[in-house]
Structures are given as C-alpha cells and as structure tokens.
Amino acid sequence: MQLELRGIIESRYAYFAEYRFQYRAEPQAILAHFSGERLQFLQALLHAAPRAKTWCTLDFEALHQSYPAEHSRVVKALDYLAEQGWIELEAKQMTEVYAVLQPHVDAEALGAELSHYFKTKEASEVARIQGVLDLFASESCLSQRLATYFGDQDAPQQCGHCSVCLGQTASWPEPDKRPPLAGLGFSALCAELMARHQSVQGNAPSAELLTRFLCGISAPLLTRLKARSLSGFAALEDYPYAQVRAWVQDSIKAAN
C-alpha cells in the first residue's frame, strides 16, 4: 500500500467485523454444559445474537453493554462452540486497523501525487498487456523478440520452432463494427449520473468516473450513487475503454 510505503500509516492488526452462526444444538442444551461466570457470559453472548430465520448475527455493541468482554474472548468462545459442533460459524468483513503516523499530512497534495502514480501505473500496465498481444501477433520470430526484450542481442533471427518460424503466424480477429462514438449523445447517456453526482457530492463527476459508468465498471463511488439503476450504465461496454475515455474528455471540453 502506497500510504504505508510513504510512512503515513502503519498496519497494526486485522479482525472479522461480523460473526454469524446457526444452531446445531438448542441454546439451552449448549448452556447446560457451563456454570458460574462462563454460563453468564455465554447467556449474554447468545442473547446478543438474535435469530433471523436460520442465522444469528452477533451484535458486539449489545453484548458489550450487557456483559463487557474482550473481543478476543468472544471470538474464542464462538470458535469453541463451533469446534464442539454446537453451532455452524461464519466470519465476514475482514477489517484492517491502521495507525496514523503522519496526522498532519497535506491531503490535497498527497491525493494529487497518488492520482499521478496510479495513472502512470495504469498506462504502464496497459502498454505491457498491449506488448504481449503484439508479440503473439508478430510476423517475426517470437523467440528472437523475447530474447531481444530481455537484452540478448546474440539470439538468432529465427529459432526454427516457434509458431512464426513454422509458418503459423497468429492474427487477432477484427472487432465487431460499432457506431462511431462521435454520433452518440453524451448528455443523454450521462445526464442521470451527472445529476445524482451533483446532488450527492456537490460537484460534477470526473471524466474517469463517467468512463467507468459508461463501460459498466464498478467503483466505490458508483456503488454509493447506485449507478447501476441509472440510464446509461454500461451503455458503451462493447467499446474499448481508452476510446470511451477520450470521447468523454472531448465531450466535456466541448460542453465547457
């Protein structure tokens, strides 16, 4: 994680935020195995996990109010009940806890720096994948191209055993013909998202967010905005992402 590498935060520990279980034995039969303080603790634990049809979800806050106990003790108790075959246990929502080492960091400058880093990394990864595609569609010896890539300038021009040398040059199928993006209505496709974003966030969505929306790619903010229910979501999923992004950027410039 970039924030850790920059010494801004430090990982401390992780835990499951949600525990739920279903009974394999009746609660009273389970409690009959205990006495004294352990019985009181388990009574409070089971009481703090109301049953909904089949599964019981533990409310840690309710348990803490009725019977203060360490989180680790609660987890150990649930694990023990599961080991005895009295409950079937599920743990969900892994949560990591971090310590903030630099509380006064310039958030705006850091955000810009991280944005640049991830955009550069994205471009590098896209270029790398494109390079792999170009390699397999090459009309020259694949082994020689790989050797050159890794700095071997003495490799023979033809290896004699790759698909190209054997006369089996690969070619990628042509993409299906699609209507040009220039002929599509940017405002019509993005109007609902732009209106909801303005209402919730107080500003206009970025070109990157609009591109993800049109290509049907999920993002945390799109989830919060319930973008899947909006007109235009995934409308351009059959178009290359880079083309859609360029079209969105041009459309925004033209509108401004």
Image (cartoon, rainbow, N blue to C red):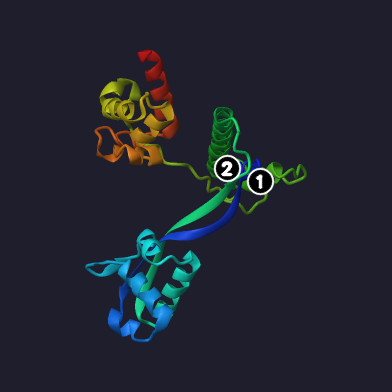
Q: Nearer the viewer, residue 20 or 134?
A: 20
Q: Do the residues bearing badges 2 and 1 touch, measured as CB atoms within 8 Å?
A: yes
The three-letter code of the residue at mark 1 reads Leu
Residue that sits furthest to the left in the current view: 53
Q: Which mark is residue 135?
A: 2
Q: Secondary structure at mark 1?
A: helix
| Residue 153 visible in the shown view | yes
In the figure, is residue 212 to the left or right of 166?
A: left
Q: Residues within 10 Å of mark 2 (few under 14, many from 20)?
A: some
Q: Residue at x 38, y 19 (%)?
A: 252
Q: Secondary structure at mark 2?
A: helix
73 in relation to 1, above or below? below
The three-letter code of the residue at mark 2 reads Leu
Q: Residue at x 39, y 35 (%)?
A: 212
Q: Can you give x and y, in whole percent of width and height, for residue 142 in the image?
A: 62, 46
Residue bearing mark 1: 146
